[in-house]
Image: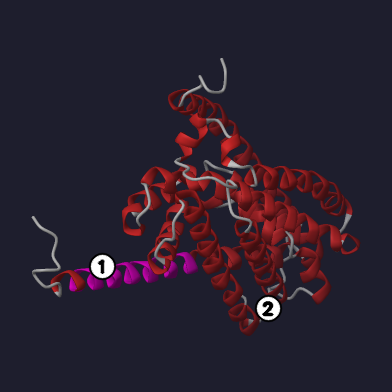
């Protein structure tokens, strides 16, 4: 069957079939990994109390909050490219912040559903807003994996054994993946089969995604590394250990995100981060850092949701007030 004959319904059936196969396998892998990490940490646990520097911990929240805003702006640029027009800045950023809390629904479907439900508020088709998650995820994972492994490779001399090898070989694998992703994102839409364009709700011509999307994700992950550096320092890690382990704060969310069946990557992200940090700062401090980072992330997601709801209500109130202030001549005929 040719690509042109492979319609939208066929693509959807293929995606559902692959999802049914992948979900149980990913669930088993996630459970096995979390159990292994818990046993490994328990075997190396140190009973010494972890001393927390609360000032550094408070400072670590700032780059994390800024990264959420950068991520929302990058998504706005992407959807604007997909629909071929400018979108309202405040409403679009608010919708993105609002959707982040929905990541904690199993299967990550909540994020997509919230964005689609709010698509009318930003003047974009719901199908396009929903499919933007596919393109965004490609860039998010590719850039995140590359940034994380670059950081590990840069400080490989401060890592030990398998972790040092992970930095070296992981960089090669994710560099190839990142290059392939950038090639896909730069494809002209005229070279993409009509069935795929229709399924993604793409309009206009030009590259699939703006160059600003992966660049914004690069800034997002660098801010995440800064957050990780400060958290590691806050739980007692040295400057060298904090730098060497900063890449794990990038790779842990990527791994947690790829564990599709786990709500928000809960457990998987913490297990990966704890294993990565333990050799350089000890199991107790590593687990503390992982839990602190997760707690900060969840609290910021909730704060972002509250801010987004306030912005959405304010925008709706202004629209209603503007409609009431119209003169009879300005109002459209019934």
Residue at x 51%, y 57% (from the top left corner): 75
- Observer-nearest of 273 and 228: 228
| Mark 2 crowd level (few <14, some 14–19, many ≥20, 10 Å Cα) | few
**Residue underneath mark 2:** 51
Is 186 drawn above or below residue 280 in the view shown?
above
Is 283 drawn above or below residue 119 in the view shown?
below
| Dominant secondary structure (helix, strand or loop) of the stretch shown in magenta | helix
Is 168 drawn above or below residue 49 in the view shown?
above
Q: Which mark is residue 164?
A: none
- In the rendered image, which quarter is residue 251 located in? bottom right
Residue at x 87%, y 50% (from the top left corner): 165
Give how far across and how far down residue 224 sits, in percent. 65, 66
Q: Is 200 situated left or right of 226 in this image? A: left
- In the rendered image, which quarter is residue 99 located in? bottom left
Q: What span is colored magenta in the figure?
A: 299-321
The stretch drawn in magenta includes residue 302: yes
**Residue underneath mark 1:** 316
Give how far across and how far down residue 58 sits, in percent. 58, 80
Q: Quadrant of the N terminus?
A: top right
- Observer-nearest of 91 and 229: 91
Could one spot residue 270 in this view of the protein? Answer: no
Give how far across and how far down residue 286 sits, in percent. 70, 64
SS for callout 2: loop
Give how far across and how far down residue 324 sits, in percent. 13, 72
Q: Residue furthest front?
A: 329
- In the rendered image, which quarter is residue 86 located in? bottom left
Q: Are marks 2 and 1 in contact (CB under 8 Å)?
A: no
Q: Quadrant of the C terminus?
A: bottom left
Could one spot residue 234 in this view of the protein? Answer: yes
Lower sequence index among marks 2 and 1: 2
SS for callout 1: helix
- Please state which of the two labelled residues, at mark 2 or mark 1, is closer to the viewer: 1
């Amino acid at each position: 069957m040719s690509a042109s004959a492979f319609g939208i319904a066929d693509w959807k059936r293929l995606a559902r079939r692959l999802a049914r196969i992948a979900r149980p396998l990913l669930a088993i892998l996630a459970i096995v990994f979390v159990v292994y990490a818990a046993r490994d940490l328990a075997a190396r646990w140190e009973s010494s109390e972890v001393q927390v520097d609360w000032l550094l911990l408070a400072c670590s929240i700032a780059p994390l909050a800024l990264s959420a805003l950068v991520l929302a702006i990058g998504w706005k640029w992407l959807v604007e490219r997909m629909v071929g027009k400018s979108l309202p800045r405040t409403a679009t950023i608010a919708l993105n912040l609002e959707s982040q809390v929905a990541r904690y629904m199993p299967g990550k479907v909540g994020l997509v559903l919230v964005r689609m439900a709010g698509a009318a508020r930003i003047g974009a088709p719901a199908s396009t807003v929903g499919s933007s998650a596919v393109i965004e995820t490609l860039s998010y994972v590719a850039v995140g994996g590359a940034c994380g492994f670059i950081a590990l490779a840069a400080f490989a001399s401060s890592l030990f054994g398998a972790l040092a090898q992970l930095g070296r070989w992981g960089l090669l694998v994710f560099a190839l993946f990142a290059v392939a992703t950038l090639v896909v994102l730069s494809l002209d839409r005229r070279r993409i089969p009509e069935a795929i364009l229709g399924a993604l709700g793409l309009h206009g011509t030009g590259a699939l995604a703006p160059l600003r999307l992966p660049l914004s994700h690069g800034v997002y992950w660098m801010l995440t590394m800064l957050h990780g550096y400060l958290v590691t320092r806050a739980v007692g890690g040295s400057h060298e250990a904090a730098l060497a382990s900063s890449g794990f704060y990038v790779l842990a969310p990527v791994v947690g995100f790829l564990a599709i069946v786990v709500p928000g990557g809960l457990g998987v992200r913490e297990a990966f981060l704890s294993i990565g940090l333990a050799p350089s700062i000890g199991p107790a401090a590593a687990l503390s850092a992982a839990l602190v980072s997760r707690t900060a992330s969840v609290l910021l997601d909730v704060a972002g949701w509250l801010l987004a709801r306030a912005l959405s209500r304010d925008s709706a109130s202004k629209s209603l007030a503007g409609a009431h202030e119209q003169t009879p001549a300005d109002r459209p005929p019934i």
